[in-house]
Structures are given as structure tokens and as C-alpha cells.
């Protein structure tokens, strides 16, 4: 329960910060984060395929 409260507080803080930032900055940050998550997902998918081959 404490984890959920902390996560909601952090989410509120981040959303409050984004609300006061310029739209161009928020959009650029969103693109950077999306690219980072996409690259991470591709690396994880590729690593799991290569690591689970039958011997």
C-alpha cells in the first residue's frame, strides 16, 4: 500500500512539473523517453530470443 501511495505522489509531482513546462520541451522529452523505451524493448526481445535456444 505504501508503494502505491509513493507511486501516486511521484506521478503527481511529474505531471505537475510537465504542466508548467513549455509544450515543445514536454514533447521532446516524451520522444526521448519513447525512443529509450523502444530501444530497451528491442534489446530485451533480441536477448531473450538468442538466450533461449535449445541445445
Image: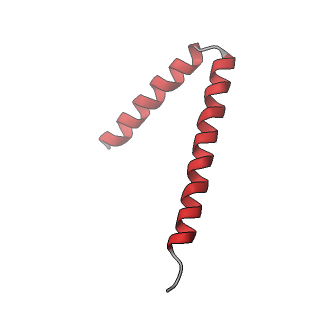
* Picture quadrant of residue 34: top right
20 is higher (above) or lower (below) than 14: above
At x 66% / y 25%, what residue is drawn?
A: 28
Identify which residue, 24 or 36, lies in the foreground.
Answer: 36
Identify which residue, 27 or 44, lies in the foreground.
Answer: 44
The residue sitting at the left extreme is 2
Identify which residue, 2 or 21, lies in the foreground.
Answer: 21
* Picture quadrant of residue 26: top right
Quadrant location of the N terminus? top left
Colour setup of the view: secondary structure
Q: How many discs appear?
A: 0
Locate residue 30 relative to residue 13 in the image: left or right.
Answer: right
23 is higher (above) or lower (below) than 12: above
At x 58% / y 44%, what residue is drawn?
A: 37
> Whole-percent x and y of residue 21?
59, 14
24 is higher (above) or lower (below) than 55: above
> Whole-percent x and y of residue 38?
62, 47
Identify which residue, 38 or 47, lies in the foreground.
Answer: 47
Locate residue 50 relative to residue 5 in the image: left or right.
Answer: right
33 is higher (above) or lower (below) than 53: above
At x 53% / y 79%, what residue is drawn?
A: 53
> Whole-percent x and y of residue 6?
36, 34
> Whole-percent x and y of residue 51?
50, 71
At x 67% / y 25%, what residue is drawn?
A: 27
Amino acid at each position: 500500500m505504501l508503494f502505491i501511495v509513493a507511486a501516486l505522489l511521484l506521478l503527481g509531482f511529474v505531471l505537475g512539473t510537465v504542466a508548467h513546462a513549455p509544450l515543445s520541451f514536454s514533447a521532446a522529452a516524451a520522444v526521448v523517453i519513447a525512443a529509450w523505451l523502444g530501444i530497451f524493448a528491442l534489446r530485451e526481445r533480441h536477448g531473450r530470443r538468442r538466450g533461449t535456444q535449445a541445445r
